[in-house]
Amino acid sequence: MTDPTLLILAAGNARRYGGIKPLAPIGLNGEGVIDLLANDALSAGFRRLVVVINPTTGPDIQSHIAEHWATDRIDVEFAIQETPHGTVDAVLCAHEAIGDAAFAVSNADDLYGPAALTHLHRHLSTSPAVNAMVAFQLDLTLVGTGPVTRGVCHIDAGGRLVGIDERRGVHRTETGSIVVDDLQDPYELAPTTRVSMNLWSFGPGIWDLFKRAMKERKDDQPEVLLPVVVDHLIHGTWADVPESLRTVTVYTSDEHCVGVTHPGDLELVQAHIAHQVDQGARVGALSGSLYH
């Protein structure tokens, strides 16, 4: 069996943040989000990464990785998403690099923690044909008070995903409650609500379904998103899909999952990382592990 692959989605345009989010300097020594993410992946057992980039910001990300990462410790390959048609399209852009094997997927601008990534590395090593995801506690995914999008997960007693609702405009109020400004119910969400942060594992049979989703994309549908396609799968929206691909095993993590969505998030995330280092939960420098 080949080493499990982690596919990192770094092709976003970061309109709200206003910069290259994967390179946002959140580490004590200016390390970017993607640096700490890759180091956590290395700690979790991943030795192969495929990074999806876009033509505009991609060269900067490539140059950064070439300059800093020790490629004798981790194998890195790049794929290019030419047009921003969503996360399903981004994954498909990496099909040639990954081949027909199972793989894990993450964002490049969220820091999930090594325990969450370990769940997926172990899953890929033991049950690669079954889809999986890691769900986080909502209140541990919010930084500041700016609005974000979260996929609210519905999980059955057997630990399987049975539904996922994309909620936009999720934010924490001045009183500490978490509300959603998308005119859907419920308006207020419990802090312990389990949510998707786009950390997935997909079996090799998923490729044809992703191609199908893009082929069926409507002209007025600019993007096709992973959570939406997964929701179609588990609800049987598409015919002729094997039962194995309709199953999504859910692992839960009680780690913080932090990232930069708005410019004001940067200082808050930097302080969070510094606190993790002070508590011994994260190394203060990447030299000797991921960095040269």
Image (cartoon, grey):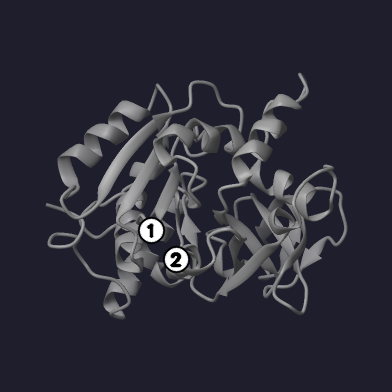
Image: 6 above or below 188: above
Image: 79 above or below 171: above
**Which residue is at the front of the view, 146 or 3?**
3
**Which residue is at the front of the view, 245 or 57?**
245
- Distance CA(mark 1)–CA(mark 2): 8 Å
Please provide percent x and percent y for residue 23.
Answer: 33, 43
Which residue is depicted at the point 64% across and 45% down? 226
| Residues at marks 1 and 2 touching, judged by CB atoms closer than 8 Å | yes
Quadrant for the N terminus, please: bottom left
Q: Specify which label sits upstream in the sequence, 1 or 2.
A: 1
Judged left or right of residue 50, residue 224 is right
Please provide percent x and percent y for residue 188.
Answer: 79, 65
Residue 199 shows in the view: no
Question: Residue 251 has which mark?
Answer: none
Judged left or right of residue 280, residue 11 is right
Crowd class of label 1 (few under 14; some 14 to 19; many from 20; radius 10 Å): few
Which residue is depicted at the point 36% across and 29% down? 58
Please provide percent x and percent y for residue 253.
Answer: 54, 73
Which residue is depicted at the point 76% across and 50% down? 233
Crowd class of label 2 (few under 14; some 14 to 19; many from 20; radius 10 Å): few
Residue 144 shows in the view: yes
Q: Amino acid at mark 1?
A: Met
Question: Residue 125 has which mark?
Answer: 2
State the image quarter where residue 150 is shown: bottom right
User: Viewer-nearest of labels 1 and 2?
Assistant: 1
Image: 57 above or below 245: above
**Which residue is at the front of the view, 142 or 242?**
242
Please provide percent x and percent y for residue 208.
Answer: 64, 37
Question: Which residue, given by chain and number where applicable, does mark 1 sit on?
Answer: 1
Secondary structure beneath dot 2 equals helix
